Amino acid sequence: MSQSTSLVPVCLAFAARRHLANAPGLPFAEHLPAPLVHATAHRLGYSFRERIFTPAVTLWTFLSQVLDPDHSCRQAVARLLAFRTAQGLRRCSPDTGAYCRARARLPEELLKELTRSTGRQLLEQAPKTWLWKGRPVKVVDGTGLSMPDTQENQKAYPKSKKRAPGVGFPVLRLVVIFGLAVGTVLEAALAAFQGKGSGELSLFRQLAESLQPGDVLLGDRLYGTFWNVAQGLAKGVDFVVRLHADRTPVWFRGRGHRTDNRRVCWHKPQRPAWLSVEDYERLPDKIRLRAVRVEVRQRGFRTRRLVLVTTLLDADAFSGADLAELYRRRWQAEIDQADCRSRGSLYLGGIAA
C-alpha cells in the first residue's frame, strides 16, 4: 500500500532556529526568561552571585554561539555586547575569558531540566490539529557523538578497544525521545558507547517512564521487541515500529487475508537477565499485533517497501496509508540526530532538537 508523495510541511522548529541564528544580540532571552532559568537553578540547589554572566545570560550567549555560523567565543561576546547596548546596560569587556569561565560553570543538571521542561511545555501547548489522529506521537531514536580527546572524556567515555592507541575520539551513545508534533526533546539518556547498560535498548528503558497513556511511540526496527511492546501496552501506549529482521517474516498471502494487512501474535520469550521475576510474571504470555506492508516514499530517495508492526489493530481507523505517512515522518528524528552529531550538542527542547 502506498501513500501520498506530497511534501511534509517545513518543521517549525527549523524555521525558528534559522530565525534565531540570524537575529542580532541574544534572541534566546525572549524564549528562556531569566526568572525561569534562575528558578530552575535554585530548585536544583545551585546558587550564584549577581554578575554580568548570570546562568541565564551565560546560557543565552552559549546557545547563540552554537547557532551562529561563527562559533568563536569572540563572536559570542560580541553578541552579548550588542544585547547589552540594545537594553541600555553598561558595556562589558570584550575579553572572552569571563564568558568561557562562566560557560564552564553551567551545571549539566540545569541544561537537562530546562530541556525537559521546555520540551514538555511546548508539546502540552500544541494545538489539537497538530496531533496524529488526536493522539501525541513520540519518536525514539539513538545515535553516537564524538567529543574532544581530553583525559576527562577518555575516562568517562573510553574509546573502542578495537582502535589502536592514540586513534579516534571518545564516543558516547545517546537515546532521545522527541515530540513529533513540535519537534522538541522530551527525554534523553546517554552512556559510554560500549559496556554493560550502554546499549540503545538499555538507555530506552531508562526513559520509558516518560511515556503517558494515549501516546503512540514511533521507532525503528530495534525497538520492536516483545518487552517494549508488552510493557508499553500495560501503560496504555501504542507502538508503530518496523518489523525486526530477526523475526519470522510475515506471510501476507492466503485465503481470507489481505495482501497488505495481517494479524500476528508474539509469544513471551524466556526471561532476560535485566527483567525481574515479578515483572516477567506480570507480562502477558502473548500479545496480538497487526503487520502492515507499506511503501514509504521520500522525495529525492528511492521508494522503500517495509513491513510495519503496530498495536493499532483497527485497520479502518488507522489505515496502511496512515501508518506509511506516519513512519515517513520518523525521518525527522534522523535529521534531528544528524544535527546533534554535527553540532555536538542538543539545543533546548523549546527551540529545536
Image (cartoon, rainbow, N blue to C red):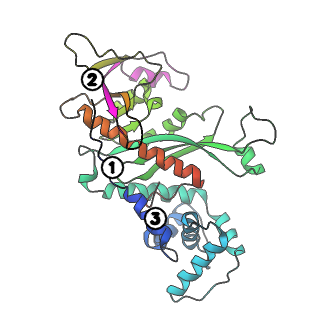
Q: CA distance from mark 3 to mark 1?
A: 18 Å
Dot 1 surroundings within 10 Å: few (below 14), some, or many (20 or more)? few
Give residue 136's position: percent from left, percent from top.
31, 46
- Residue under numbered circle 3: 18
Residue 55 appears at what percent x and percent y? 58, 70
> Mark 3 or 2 closer to N-term?
3
Give the Cα distance between marks 1 and 2: 24 Å
Q: Which residue reaches farthest right? A: 165
- Tell whether 294 sits left or right of 64: left
Residue positioned 72% across, 45% down in the render = 169
Give the amino acid type for the residue marked by disc 3 in the picture: Arg
Where disc 3 sits, the SS reads helix
Using the image as rendered, state which of residue 245 and residue 282 is in the foreground: 245
**Residue at the disc numbered 2:** 260
Reply above or below: 73 against 264.
below
**Residue stretch in magenta:** 268-297
Determine which quarter of the picture holds residue 249: top left
Secondary-structure class at tag 2: loop
Helix, strand or loop at mark 1: loop
Q: Are marks 3 and 1 in contact (CB under 8 Å)?
A: no
Q: Which residue corresponds to the image point at 39% horizontal and 23% vertical from the top-left?
A: 282
Task: Determine which of the numbered discs, if any, sits on residue 8 in the image.
Answer: 1
Q: Earlier in the sequence, mark 1 or mark 2?
A: 1
Residue at 35 percent of width and 33 percent of height: 239
Q: Position of residue 162 (x, y in %)?
A: 74, 31
